[in-house]
Amino acid sequence: MTATRKRIGRIAAELVVGFGALLLLDRLLGTGGAFAKVQPNPLWLPVLVMALAYGTMPALAAAAIASALWLLHAAPGAAERDYLDHLFHLSLPPLLWFVAAVAVGEVTMLRTARYHLLDRRASVARRNVARLTEAFHRLARTNRTLQVEVATDPRTLGHVVATASRLGSSDPAERRVALAALIAMAARSEDFTCYRFAGTEARAWLRGASAMTRPEVLPDALATLARRRQGPIHVGRRADRPALAGIGVVAIPLAQVESGRIAGCLVIHALPFAALNAHALAEMAEIGGWLTPLITVRERGNATMIQPSGRVA
């Protein structure tokens, strides 16, 4: 609304200045007859300017003002010519001014509308280019990050094979170190604890390098839930959060495939929330598949496995 008022005020000021200057020039030339003897009549200049600058409506207003000035000052001289000729002489300039105002004004409005359309399209194109540029830079940063991660990732095939080969060592301590390294590579975190069920409780059996201060005994709520489920328990599922509160972000029940008995539970205590995607959870579920046979075979004599009381999806 404010912009429209400013535009109307600017147009009115330009009309006043334009026609005022023409009337002053008419007085200075001494004719005072609205340039009746000048061809083409200068009164059409404000009409043309308004039509070219602003469009039809301002041009029609200028044509109306010019026509009024023409009729007021060019009336004398009727006795010198025929009545019909005099009417034609009076009506022809205003008619031409109105026709010019409509014709030129409409062309100006079409041109202005076309310009605004192109300007909007250019703005959209600039925004799209900015988005594409940002997406390209984001992909480039992600690509560099992945290249660095691949180059520095210790989980190379050779490293995994070398670590796994240490599981056949005759030294129990060496086997535990190798097993902890494999779990750390698979879980992408060294903050984990592998609990084994012994009697009615689950006690810590293997720890990662960053989990030395974690609880020695698995909380009853999480132990009960682990006995009832074979899939990963994680904070991404709202129902699992109370059992994991204060202990970790992911718990993987370790169940034997043949008997369904629960040998233990692998708890990952710290992990970025962004890492809890479907692919990562599937990889963690695979950990239970190869970890359960390792801990049950190596420590069968010291472990008591609990038959699950029931399972939920």
Image (tube, helix red, strand yellow):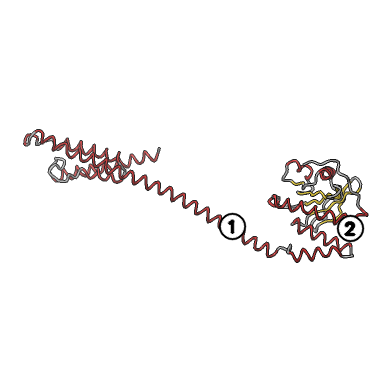
- What is the three-letter code of the residue carrying label 1? Leu
Q: Residue at x 40, y 49 (%)?
A: 118
Q: Which residue is mark 1?
A: 139
| Residue 142 appears in the rendering | yes
Q: Residue at x 73, y 43 (%)?
A: 237
Does 160 appear above or below 41? below
Q: Nearer the viewer, residue 60 or 76?
A: 60
Q: Residue furthest right?
A: 301
Q: Name the image quarter holding the C terminus.
A: top right
| Residue 50 appears in the rendering | no
Label 1 vs label 2, nearer the camera:
2
Measured as percent of width and height from the top left, residue 307 is found at 88, 45
Q: Is residue 32 left or right of residue 283?
A: left
Q: Residue furthest front?
A: 258
Q: Is residue 126 left or right of residue 144?
A: left
Q: Is residue 64 left or right of residue 206?
A: left
- What is the three-letter code of the residue carrying label 2? Arg
Secondary element at image label 2? helix
Q: Nearer the viewer, residue 32 or 282?
A: 282
Mark 1 touches mark 2? (CB < 8 Å): no
Disc 2 crowd, CA 10 A, few/some/many (<14, 14-19, 20+): some
Mark before the other along the chain sequence, 1 or 2: 1
Measured as percent of width and height from the top left, residue 303 is found at 91, 52
Quarter residue 68 falls in: top left
Measured as percent of width and height from the top left, residue 256 is found at 84, 50
Q: Residue furthest top?
A: 83
Q: Which residue is mark 2?
A: 298
Q: Nearer the viewer, residue 42 or 101?
A: 101
Does 289 appear above or below 108? below
Kindly report the distance in space between the C-alpha atoms of the residues bearing marks 1 and 2: 46 Å
Q: Residue furthest left?
A: 80
